[in-house]
């Protein structure tokens, strides 16, 4: 009995291989795992025009035969016939995306160079034509030296022609493939560009515009400059645009406190509402406009297609510190919150690369830090202009974010040369089409972000603030005694203050750092509650947090507080997720330890430097 012929679908991710596999095999499919790995083996039965059956294998998406993940390792082993009991496929069907031809042709050339019978399926030609791109398969066939068949897998267009080309593949002349085999990766990239240009019959003005935009935005030197200029504009806007709305919210909360004081008799319950709830939680809620503006820019960058370009730009910079480009997306997610960022590292195949990314994710400036930065900057940095359209407050906020990124890169460099020693692996990513951000999607995204922030204010921040108010309010102080001195919280703060005083922190800061372990924003509500409880009269209590900070803190102390929160140890939820993702307490303990050490050193260095300069 003769062996059943085999064919394999291979190509980059998102080329439409699965849809083509379904169109060729129908319901005649079976799924199992490859020996010794968790990657699925998807195989099915198809029939050639002659009626001959062929086993068709759908291989995982790959960018190269030099594997950078378990999926790519399986693809290489199948193509090379390295699995025990499995011969090389008789025919390779290389699936390429017609709308992303240049990138997909790089891997196609590597497969052509192997000298096996091969057919190229030029898939999703309908989507390419929708985008104004018309491709000549005959010209592409002449460039590659192999048959090229146009297909639309989801509509089963070109399926019969592809099956006929597969039937004739074993009769191909393989002697002309040696030229492709000698090409290096840069040479294959250049050849792919020339092949794509030669095969394109026509393209729309919009497609040409997108190509020109990529030449500018992805330029080796100009691209990073544009990216950081955009980030600079974002942080200027966070202060300049949000101030009127934040002031209105602050005024509304102050008015509400006044109403409560007029409606409820003086006593513990009124103090609980005004000092514990409205002053504490309200001091965080007033920064909702800054949160919304920041995420409006981030969502617009994602939906327009620019965020993927930013990832491509940052990939080149991250390679210098030994990080894989695959680390960028989790780190990018960490700017919203470190928890989803750490969970997103599951997509990183290299365990040391993944561990490094987990350990530095907390250094990305998450949205929880923004209220802390905003209140200190508003209190101590003048709202002055340092140039046309450039405010000093926005400049300082931008610098804090940049310092967090620099800190993460330095820590990554140290880790990759010590406990997680290794080199950066290659990274290829799909670049989406440019488009105007849909207003409806943008509005939904902003509502979701705002709701998450308000929900935290109504749960974690509320609970931590109320607990702190109770600890600050009891036992009651004797006449003439400070309420903080008499309280349980004050006694705890006295013990911690011994450690924090050398870096310029006062007792109120030392106290606020404890509940801030629940959530970073709680540091603001903790300070507001502490000063409200210790206020001598209602007028002082109603003065607000910023005037109390200005009167009670020196500029070196304020700068040290900002430096602390660049590196501040993570919230409890992040520590718990890190323990789950690393299967133990070793790495979370190391993470908390190095973050505390960096925060302490940075705050101390900032305080003593500022003091020495007479600030």
Image (tube, rainbow, N blue to C red):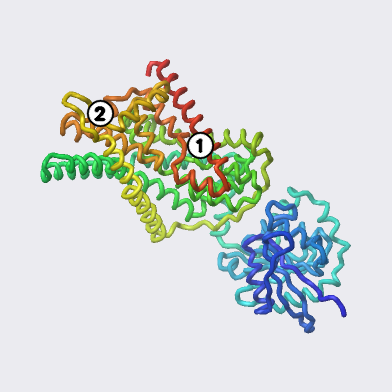
- Marks 1 and 2 in Cβ contact (< 8 Å): no
Q: Is residue 435 above or below residue 43?
A: above
How far across and how far down the image is residue 28, in percent? 68, 79
In the picture, residue 211 is in which quadrant? bottom right
How far across and how far down the image is residue 24, in percent? 69, 76
Lateral position of residue 529 relative to residue 92, left or right: left
- Marker disc for residue 592: 1
Per the model, the C-alpha gap separating discs 1 and 2 is: 32 Å
How far across and how far down the image is residue 361, in percent? 52, 42
Instruction: Name the residue that disc number 2 marks.
Output: 486
Q: Is residue 491 above or below residue 141?
A: above
Image point (77%, 62%), residue name:
78
* 544, 217: nearer the viewer: 544
Q: Earlier in the sequence, mark 1 or mark 2?
A: 2
Image point (87%, 67%), residue name:
173
* 421, 115: nearer the viewer: 421
Lateral position of residue 294 relative to residue 483, left or right: right
Q: Is residue 203 above or below residue 605?
A: below
For discs 1 and 2, the disc positioned in front in the rendered view: 2
Q: Residues within 10 Å of mark 1 (few under 14, many from 20)?
A: some
Element under disc 1: helix
Q: Residues within 10 Å of mark 2 (few under 14, many from 20)?
A: some
* 396, 475: nearer the viewer: 475
Placement of the C terminus among the 4 image quadrants: top left
* 270, 238: nearer the viewer: 270
**Can residue 128 be spotted in the picture?**
yes
**Can residue 196 be spotted in the picture?**
no
Q: Is residue 451 above or below residue 167?
A: above
Image point (62%, 33%), residue name:
414
Element under disc 2: helix
């Amino acid at each position: 009995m003769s062996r059943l012929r085999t064919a394999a679908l291979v190509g980059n991710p998102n080329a439409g291989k699965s849809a083509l596999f379904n169109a060729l095999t129908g319901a005649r499919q079976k799924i199992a795992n490859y020996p010794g790995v968790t990657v699925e083996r998807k195989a099915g039965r198809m029939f050639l025009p002659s009626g001959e059956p062929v086993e068709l294998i759908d291989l995982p998406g790959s960018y190269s035969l030099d594997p950078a993940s378990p999926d790519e390792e399986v693809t290489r082993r199948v193509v090379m016939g390295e699995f025990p009991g499995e011969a090389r496929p008789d025919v390779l069907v290389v699936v390429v995306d017609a709308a992303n031809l240049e990138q997909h042709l790089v891997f196609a050339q590597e497969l052509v160079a192997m000298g096996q019978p091969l057919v190229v399926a030029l898939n999703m030609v309908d989507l390419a034509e929708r985008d104004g791109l018309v491709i000549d398969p005959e010209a592409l066939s002449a460039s590659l030296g192999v048959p090229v068949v146009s297909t639309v897998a989801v509509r089963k267009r070109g399926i019969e022609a592809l099956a006929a080309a597969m039937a004739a593949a074993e009769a191909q002349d393989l002697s002309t493939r040696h030229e492709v085999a000698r090409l290096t990766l840069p040479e294959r990239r250049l050849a792919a560009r020339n092949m794509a240009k030669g095969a394109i019959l026509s393209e729309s003005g919009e497609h040409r515009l997108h190509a020109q935009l990529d030449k500018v935005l992805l330029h080796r030197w100009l691209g990073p400059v544009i990216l950081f200029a955009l980030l600079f504009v974002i942080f200027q806007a966070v202060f300049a645009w949000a101030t009127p709305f934040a002031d209105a919210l602050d005024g509304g909360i102050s008015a509400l406190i006044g109403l409560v004081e007029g409606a409820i008799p003086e006593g513990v319950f009124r103090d609980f509402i005004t000092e514990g709830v409205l002053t504490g939680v309200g001091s965080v809620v007033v920064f909702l406009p800054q949160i919304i503006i920041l995420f409006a820019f981030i969502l617009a960058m994602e939906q327009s297609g620019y965020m993927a370009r930013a990832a491509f730009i940052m990939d080149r910079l991250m390679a210098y510190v030994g990080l894989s480009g695959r680390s960028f997306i989790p780190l990018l997610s960490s700017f919203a919150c470190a928890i989803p960022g750490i969970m997103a590292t599951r997509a990183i195949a290299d365990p040391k690369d993944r561990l490094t990314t987990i350990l530095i994710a907390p250094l990305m400036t998450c949205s929880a830090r923004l209220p802390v930065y905003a209140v200190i900057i508003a209190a101590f940095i003048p709202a002055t202009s340092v140039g046309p359209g450039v405010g000093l407050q926005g400049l300082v906020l931008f610098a804090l974010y940049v310092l967090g990124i620099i800190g993460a890169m330095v820590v990554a460099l140290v880790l990759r040369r010590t406990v997680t020693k290794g080199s950066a692996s290659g990274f290829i990513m799909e670049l989406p089409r440019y488009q105007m951000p849909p207003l409806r999607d943008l509005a939904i995204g902003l509502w979701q972000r705002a709701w998450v922030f308000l929900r935290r204010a109504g749960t974690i921040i509320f609970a931590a603030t109320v607990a702190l108010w109770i600890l600050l309010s009891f036992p009651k102080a004797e006449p003439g005694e400070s309420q903080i001195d008499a309280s349980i919280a004050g006694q705890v703060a006295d013990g911690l203050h011994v450690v924090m005083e050398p870096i310029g922190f006062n007792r109120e800061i030392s106290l606020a750092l404890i509940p801030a372990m629940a959530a970073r924003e709680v540091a603001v509500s903790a300070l507001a509650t502490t000063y409200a409880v210790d206020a001598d009269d209602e007028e002082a209590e109603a003065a607000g947090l910023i005037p109390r900070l200005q009167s009670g803190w020196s500029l070196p102390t304020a700068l040290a507080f900002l430096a602390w929160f660049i590196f501040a140890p993570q919230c409890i939820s992040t520590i718990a997720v890190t323990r789950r993702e690393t299967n133990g307490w070793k790495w979370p303990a190391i993470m908390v330890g190095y973050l505390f050490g960096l925060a302490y050193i940075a705050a101390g260095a900032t305080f003593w430097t500022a003091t020495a300069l007479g600030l």
